[in-house]
Image (cartoon, rainbow, N blue to C red):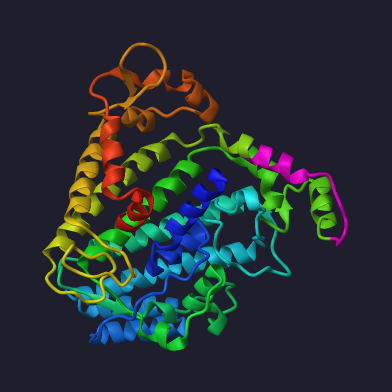
Amino acid sequence: MRTMQKSGRRKMAYRKAGIFFLITVLAFSHCPGQDPAPAPGAPVKMSPEAAVLQKLLTAGQINPGIDYMRKKLAEDPENDRLRYALGLLQFTRAVERLSQSWYRYGLRPPPEFARELPFLRLPVALNPSPEEADHAAIRGVLQTFLDDLARCRATLGGMKDESASMPVRLGLVRLDLDGDGQAGDGEMLWNIVSRIMQADLPPETVESFVIEFDAADAYWLRGYSHIMSALLEFWLAHDDAELFSATAHLFFERPNPAHDFLLEERADARAPGRRVVPRHFFDAAALVHGMISLPLKEPARMHAVLEHLRQVTAMSRESWRCCMAETDNANEWIPNPKQSSVIPGAKVTPEMIRQWMAMLDELDAILKGEKLIAFWRGSQPRGVNIKKVFENPADFDLILWIQGTAAEPYLEYGPLTDPSFWRQLTESFNGRFVPYAIWFN
């Protein structure tokens, strides 16, 4: 019962992470299941650039929109509203292209034990005629998503005008999820989210829900893309070919290589009243076995992971610097303590911000190797140098990390991060640190 309660609280936390976050939650994290009842935004006056952006997003014209904004930006390179609009379109395109790739390769609903894996959460329709999904092709999909995120960051990184803002009626955004060249009503973002959340909202609520993305949110999005890029780089740094061969049938309609007996059992399971061997237990074991023991393939990518993580803390600092300087209260995604958020019931206190900034200091020290993570075995006060884990990577083996021998090359004597600091941090967020961390980024 206690485990079920914890699971329920964890899922509830993710549900309240917000509407904009759900764009990537669908690809990245837990499946929401409750209506967050987004509050109607305050009246907003759209700039000409924002009006064009909204028109493009509502029509699902993402690629033409990118071309249009690039052209306009070339004509007016100092216009950061155009640059902001282009960055938002590029991020939307990254998510859309990932969805289209999954449709192309026949992504199927994964079994219950695999439904929280990153980047496989997009609600892709079943493709009746998918292409074969081989290992190289799927790694290519992840690399393309990684490249798309980098393009978005590069665009937003060129912004200098911190007064630039971009209000968006986010629920009206349409995505061409299956790559058929059309973005219909069923592919409207709020309809997608509603299906995932199993909740309906009246059209007038969706129409009136606005997020006014400002300079703080541009830094936030850059930081969030660094988190996703760190995960992607970590995965691509390792050789998952054997894991793919053993478990691709769980995720794709036509895996290559295909083990016929696995596909046959999958087909048998669809027959009503047909009982088969509880294969999911063995498939889950194979998936876990493959994920906790991965040979290193491209060490340079681990260096990139470290840099992405450092950029996450840097972008968070910049985001909060801009946020705390704001004096308005206009459809805020992340508010300062004197503002209100578009997310109902989401409050930010000065103590939360103080503790968050202290956490960024602590994370920076850990990523620089100035503080160590305490090693749990032995009588000596040693710790793991996380910086060296990424700078001198080895094959990943979770069991050996838990047992301790995998950590040995990275053990040092020095200042340790204090567990009491992390306990105090959790208490400052009333025990809801995880959902706030997802939101704050």
In the image: residue 350, left or right of residue 153 = left
- Most extreme residue toward the front is 1
- The residue shown at (23%, 85%) is 47
- The residue shown at (53%, 44%) is 2
In the image: residue 268, left or right of residue 115 = right
Instruction: Name the image quarter holding the C terminus.
Output: bottom left
- Most extreme residue toward the top is 379
Foreground: 171 or 12?
12
Occupied quadrant, residue 101 = bottom right
The stretch drawn in magenta includes residue 284? yes
Foreground: 322 or 258?
322
Percent from the top left, x then y, of residue 223? 31, 55
Percent from the top left, x then y, of residue 285? 67, 37
Percent from the top left, x then y, of residue 225? 36, 56
136, above or below 184, in the image: above
Q: Does any portion of residue 142 appear in the rendered image?
A: yes
> For the magenta stretch, what is the residue range?
271-287
